[in-house]
Image (tube, rainbow, N blue to C red):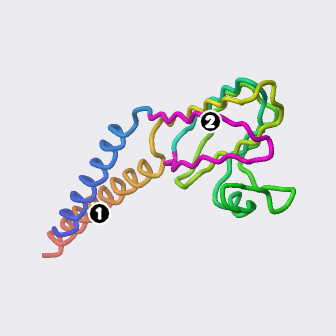
Amino acid sequence: MRYQIIGEILMAFGIAILISNLFRANNWSQVYDMFLNDPDKIYIEGFKSPPRNLKLEVIVKGGSIDLYLVDRRGIEDLEFSGLNIKLKNKNISYIKYYHNITYLCDVLSMERKCYFILVKILKMKENNVIVNIRITLYGFDRDLIYIGLSLILIGISLIIVAKRFDKMMIKIF
């Protein structure tokens, strides 16, 4: 009897997690506007991402840029001195690299962690390069779906085992 109650509680938690994931599934957007004027600097913006799909839109006016999408390993390749950010080596560990862009629209599948966008001016046509970055997260949190379904399956298994065990005990006595 106890296993059946535990199974029912686990099923309820699993269903609650799945329902909460439905409410979290709406689109979330963040916009970064950058006004860049020094071609020797690397500009950086950070954000946290759940394990969802990410749509990255970049519009560049007044020139073109190199854009790196990195995690913490990529940040370790940078050297911070005051407001200046420079590469320690010539290489950087990146997740995604876009070269010489003026417009970009890409969809990526993300994990749950911190990400950083590094921007370096490649060509300047005017005094300032204006970069507009829009990050849109959409879809379901994959890890919450797995947790919810796992709890439901464990709960169902416990209920089945408890009912079988009760039937066996009735036949014995």
In which quadrant will I find the C terminus?
Answer: bottom left
The mark tally for this picture is: 2
Q: Note whether 26 is above or below 72 in the view shown.
A: above
Percent x, y for residue 7?
25, 61
- Please identify, in this view, whether the residue under mark 2 or under mark 1 is nearer the observer: 2
How many angstroms separate mark 2 from mark 1 (CA)? 55 Å
Choose between 143 and 51: the one closer to the eye: 51
Q: Amino acid at mark 2?
A: Met
Main SS category, magenta section: strand
In depth, the one of 78 and 25 nearer the eye is 78
Which residue shows up at 75% across the image and 26% down it?
102
The quarter of the picture where residue 133 lies is top right
- Point out the stretch of residues depicted in magenta: 28-51
Please, is residue 114 above or below residue 31 in the view? below
Identify residue for label 1: 158
Q: Does residue 14 belong to the magenta stretch?
A: no
Residue denoted by label 2: 34
